[in-house]
Amino acid sequence: MTVQITKPVPVPGTEASVPGPAPSRLRALLPGPSAGANGAAMYRRWWLPWLWTAPAIVCAVVFGVFPFLNTVLLSFTNAKPLGGAASFVGLDNYTRMLDDSDFWLATRNSILYAVIVVPLMVLLPLMLAVLVEKNLPGIGFFRSAFYTPVLASSVVVGLSWQWLLADDGLVNTWLEKAHLIRSAIPFLSDSWLILLSAMGLTLWKGLGWYMVFYLAALGNVPKELHEAAQMDGAGAVRRFWHITIPGVRQAMMLVGTLTGIGSLRVFTEIYMLGSSTGGPGGADRTLPFYIRDVGLDPITGNAGYGSAVSVALFLLTLGLTLLAQRLTKEDES
Amino acid sequence: MRAKRLTGSLACLVVLTLTAAGCGLSGGGSGDGDASAGGCKVDQGNVGTGKLSGEVKGKITFQTTNLKKDFGTFFNSVIADFEKAHPGTEVKWIDDPGDNTFTTRTVADAQACTLADVINVNAPTATALTKAGYLLDVGTKDPDAAKPFVPAFWKTAVFKDAGGKAIHTALPWYTGGVILTYNKDLLKKAGVDPAKPPTTLFGLFADFEKVAKAGDGKFYATMANPIWRIPSDFDQMGIKTLSDDGKSAVFADDPRTTQWVAWMAKLYKAGAMPKDSLSSSNDPSTLYSQGKVAYGSTNPSFVRFVKQNSPSIYDRTAVGQQPYDALGRASAGAPQYISVAATSKNAPTALSFAEFLTNAENQTAWCKDPAVVIFPTTTESLNDPFFQKVTGTDPFSQARKLVADQLKTASTNQTSLSPAVQNAMVAQVQLAMQGKKSPAQAVKDAQEKANELLKQAG
């Protein structure tokens, strides 16, 4: 028996039969020697990826790298917010920072903010997402309701919370009527309570946003695992700890990192509840608030010192992020 | 290979750093002029001594603060009149939202050499821009510029340049006026005679104390946040806030400052103010309209607000003169200003338009607009029967009459503090009001904090 080998016939609709393939047209437009028979050599030119990414690189340099480097440079000067001559002052701004009690107060508040808000912001939206994940009749209403604060402007939310937390506001009135307190809790005049209230505001406004993150992550947790565990007699809590949490670990890491960075940058919540001084005596000022006070005031600001505090804030953020990553890796290993 | 990559990366970093240094610290600027204002190159005629000369012609930009929505017809008409009077000119009107980032954004515009040619500014913005040299010295560039204005208002338009020299970089535009507004019923309950407003600030504080006793937590005298009183109370009392050159704080040297803080602390403790208003940004408008605060805001516009929003409280409202105290007569307050950018490429046209906008005719027309409750700053405008012959006896008419009467002979002792210095002072007074510091210590610390900020400003 003989086997006849024939030349393959192109099947209509396959790549070989498509007239004028796109790579050929592209090749004609590009400079340089013609590509090899299969055209792949063209894609191996070292500069081509850089060409495609050049716009993004330019944007990143202009709007990201340049301002950052400029801030670092300014931190070694006595520059004014309005420009003009600035002279090099070496490490003066950094040594001043070490002796500045207001700076340390702001740093304490920022760290406290992150330490309290981040764990809650990682867990509470997850629990909320688990509650609204199931497809029950009317569950869409609750999902929308939890998401509504995300859509409201910070100013509107701040004003609403002022109204809620005032001495004769809804919270105090309700507590008094329930005979749980005798006199109003000073949510808006005690420096600790202003800080905690601002954290509550941040949590309330962020819950819906991160709930959506988790809803997407929960969709990727295999249902079979839950079913198998349930058949083995595992209760809801055990399934949550042993199946849900490992399943959304990556999302939790992301939420933790984003919330950590956000917590260190808090400004509006403190401004809305503690006014332009940052609470009585400026006791609730966070680092961004302090940067505004010392660096950005157009008349008495010192952009050099403000930049030094900004660099400190950057290092703090970087440090906390790296620490969180390391802890997560250790946990994984 | 790795070492090569590292060297390349470091080289890139150095290049970027040097670029950043070049762009960030040198000021920059543009233009074909042969002098500089701020960090920008400008025409020689815009700076230094000598009257500004040149043809009134060409395009200029005019920036207002949140006025386009309600007053478009008026300003378009003023612009059309100017363009008609000066053929070949074109005014492009832009309107800033006027939110709390206004000063920061305006400063950024100035640094980028893109400040509008004619710009509506408040006192802190004018102070900052003058110090950095971004505003035209109108007093020098037009020696007749002062003529139309009430002397007290022209005096408020003085700001210090980088060398500490006082110059006129703004034209006074309009003002809100300052009066005392109060709820007659609540004052009667407290045993305060509404027909006899106090003549001193501490006299007013004594009335606040009576209200606190009568109110007993059900109603209050006023709001607690001292930001509403600093530095206007100091100015009214004649307490010197800053030194003559504006480079150091001196308010702690006057014993009345400590007395003032002691009064505030006493009043707060006695319940003259809602406890939660200590660091609140709310003014008394809302609580006054609910009948919970005896004394309202201090401008006539507030009276109209109450008339429109709370008629029952309006029926119980009366107006009176703010205590004259050491000033001896009413304060001109801090009006809104119109400035000309020293960076303007068409300064003669810009100055001409600024003076046209603030002239007596246009000020009178603007202040008669039924949509506003504001007062002009030119002598001729204030003499207009619309302001001087108010016949109504209702609180709103009375408020207008009171302000119009006082502005013609107003005095001025206005201190323009930077927001940071004001916040530093307010923060210390808040601590004293909470009893966390003695008034004397709070005043001492406030002065120290203010001086730290003023020192870093140079």
Image (cartoon, coloured by chain):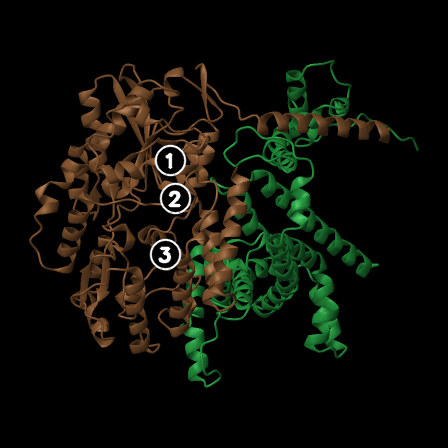
Chain of the residue under label 2: B
SS for callout 3: helix
Disc 1 marks a residue whose amino acid type is Phe
For label 1, the SS is strand
The residue indicated by pointer 2 is B416
In contact (CB < 8 Å): disc 3 and disc 1: no
Which chain identifier belongs to the brown chain? Answer: B
Hey, what amino acid is under mark 3? Trp
The part of the image, by quadrant, that contains residue A105 is: bottom right
Q: Upstream in the sequence, badge 1 or badge 2?
A: 1
Label 3 vs label 1: CA separation? Answer: 23 Å
Disc nearer the start of the sequence (3/1):
1
Q: Between residues A190 and A170, which one lies in front from this camera angle?
A: A190
Please give the residue where the numbered disc 3 appears in the rendered image.
Answer: B228
Instruction: Please report the residue visible at 52 percent of the width from the left and 56 percent of the height from the top.
Output: B445
On residue B159, which mark appears?
A: 1
Please tell me which residue is depicted at 78% across the width and 26% down the height of the picture: B8
Marks 1 and 2, Cα distance to the nearest angstrom?
9 Å
Dot 2: element: loop
Q: Pinpoint the chain carrying mark 1.
A: B
Q: Please report contact status of discs 1 and 2: CB closer than 8 Å, yes or no.
A: yes
Indicate which label's residue lies in the foreground, 2 or 3.
Answer: 2
